[in-house]
Image (spheres, rainbow, N blue to C red):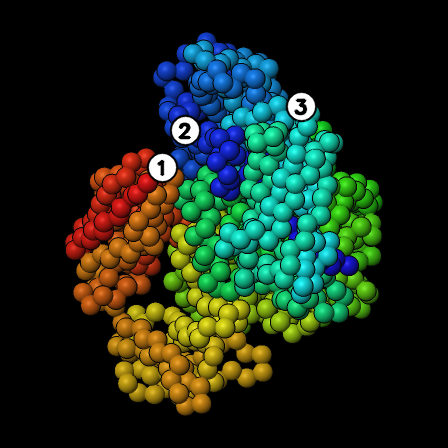
Amino acid sequence: MLKGVSFLFVILMCGCFAVSAQANQRKQDFDANWKFLLGDDSLASNTNYNDTKWRTLNLPHDWSIEGAFDEKAPGTQNEAGLPTGIGWYRKTFKLPASAKNKNVFIDFDGVYRDSEVWINGHYLGKRPNGYISFTYDLTPCLNFGDKENVIAVKVDNSGQPNSRWYSGSGIYRNVWLTTVNKTYFKQWGTFITTPKINTHSATVNINAAINISDKGLQLKTTIANQQGEIVASSLLPLVDAVSEQNLTVKNPTLWSPDKPYLYKVTLQVLRGNIILDSYESNLGIRSLEFTANQGFLLNGVRTKIKGVCLHHDAGALGAVVNKRAIERQLQILKNMGCNAIRTSHNPPAPEFLDLCDHMGFLVMDEAFDMWKKKKNKHDYAENWNECHERDLADQILRDRNHPSVFMWSIGNEIREQFDSTGIIITKELVKIVKGIDNIRPITSALSESIPEKNFIYKSGELDVVGINYHQERYADFPKNYPGQKFIATETTSALETRGYYDEPTDSTRHWPTSAKSPFTQGNNEMSVTAYDNVAAYWGSTHEETWKVIKKYDFLSGMFIWTGFDYLGEPSPYPWPARSSYFGIVDLAGFPKDVYYMYQSEWTSKPVLHLLPHWNWKAGQLVDVWAYYSQADEVELFLNGKSLGMRRKYNDDLHVSWKVKYEPGTLKAVSTKAGKVILTETIHTAGAPAKIELIADRKSIKADSKDLSYITIKVLDKDGNVVPNADNLVDIKINGAGNLAGMDNGSQSNLESFKTNHHKAFHGLCLAIIQSGSKAGKINVTATSAGLQPASIALSTTK
């Protein structure tokens, strides 16, 4: 049982939040001005190597996403058919003479994969895991003053296939240079919890590991609320390398997805009035508890976990970590009512957890997709024996202070669950986790739901039983797993393509019907109907699983496969399909229709969503669905004529009508007690006539990283989106920015994400604009043959 638990986001060498002035000086963004070579040169680690002809770029960088789709790519269709291989990165830099008596570290948030690093020709080490953060001490090998330093990084992603989804290639997460005095806070060495919480106070326990080189030091600690008021403080002599203290926050405001309240903690090591090292961190105070009967309790309140699984790619940006790209995904999911994310199936970027802390998401932080038994020819199983203990420990140390992280997963559908080695390895991994963080519960995502057949479960080490799919067995969980706690670690695997509709809609189809059956049910467009009635053979429709999770209190919640479409794993279609069909939101970030089913169920806002579009053949019988909430019933009108009222009965999640098509206007009106709540109207669209541009943000930061996502709509002369429009759209950028990528959400489109033109897909397309380093204006113009062009002005500010 877990009570009174809270966590502090700790920034040491690899953190990413704003810190005090002193701490900002200790950590520098090290992403700019690297040299890159796509290929291998064994001499590239030498200091005097001539890299002048190499490409100059800024990190993070993913070279795979820049390549062409190829059916014969070594990574296979599961990795989206994009190139992999070997790449080299080099950076030349100087350090001031004032840094000579300090310690200097380089921190990599993630490199995919098999990275090796040299500084001034000295070999620092190798990290095969492509998702883990790691650090090297550069101090003994550095030059200071006018003499240059050269860091070289080899990235080897040539052993293929090594992933079941798109991984990307390169230094795809951020890099930092950390400079500290000889006395400093150790990387990931601080662990902060709140062992006691009640309505009147919270006890904050701070355990900080500090490298001490001086005597007569003090540790100053303050905790401030969101208004900047100091609510607790201490000043203690610093004697030992590990300092432990308890502070009390009176009348604490608790952290939750609905109100992600964060306190700020500042720690400083002082020698008299001199600050030797300091950082600021964020503290979220909250209690959590899984129970066998009531499910999950957050701050003592029963809370249904309404979660999705997410892979790490960002659509047209590939694996490149961009804070705004992550934020946009989370905003879209938050608006749907999602309150939890499972990081499938590896540790996420630090920025992801920072945003979840601030925006209010519970995170299941997952470690591995495989253990010793491989799923791909050259995957992490090859590195398991020598790497897994260190990699798992580094993950827990790095992430254990985030309030968003509420549980650990030690694996996904691990093959050792089917034999006794599963017991041995589970015990080892749980011991590693509990030795670092004995607060959060541990689960593993089990694909074998029969308890006596599952050796990971039989180890007796899981705090919460995680089951993937098998929703037909959820109701019997208390009988099959007496006294155990439940989480649906992965559910659904429904299939949809945004904007595509076919019938019938009154029965569920499984594409394919089994693992042994060839897939023959598809269509030439390589699409799947957006009505929620098609799923993978192992899965279910969205409505089917949510009805079960919603019904039983002991079912703590679910993680849907998946929140967004992702690159790779394009089941059920063969090539040229290159990205998944599982998402509630497509790869470009455009919601599919089922998004509004969840919004109607997972939020308290009024919802009314009508589907499909209204462009059909004369006389065709069309199934019309409506998702709605905060209303009693919905009335449908065609060209002003009522087609009848519908209301949900029992566990219905939508209402429907069969309508004989005639062009014109389809209108839905939801009412409550006779009062109109919402109205939605769909018009028959004419021929494509013009383009419309809509930016999610017209003002962005001039930091060479910020993004504006521009939705491109193909409209008829009256302003209606043309649902079958596939016009080729060209984008021209002038000013203080550049085009970072284009996409349209089609799962089988082989256009490069990096060209300045893209076809619309069902009337929509997307352009991603990235800022430069200077403030100014960005003018974006979209043109297409035969269509009225459109322009939009953006600005960048320092």
**Could you tell me the amino acid type at mark 1?**
Ser
**Could you tell me the amino acid type at mark 2?**
Ala
- Which element carries disc 1, helix, strand or loop? loop
Near mark 1 (Cα within 10 A), the count class, few <14, some 14-19 or many ≥20, is: some
**Camera-nearest residue between 375 and 11:** 11
Q: Which mark is residue 704?
A: 1
Q: Marks 1 and 3, Cα distance to the nearest angstrom? A: 39 Å
Q: Marks 2 and 1, Cα distance to the nearest angstrom? A: 9 Å
**Camera-nearest residue between 243 and 513:** 243
In the rendered image, which residue does mark 3 sit on? 213
In the rendered image, which residue does mark 2 sit on? 32
Q: What residue is drawn where x is 77% and y is 41%?
A: 435
* Direction front: furthest residue: 272
Image check: 435 left or right of 763? right
**Pointer 2 and pointer 1: residues touching (CB < 8 Å)?**
yes
Is residue 532 at all visible to an observer of this figure? Answer: no
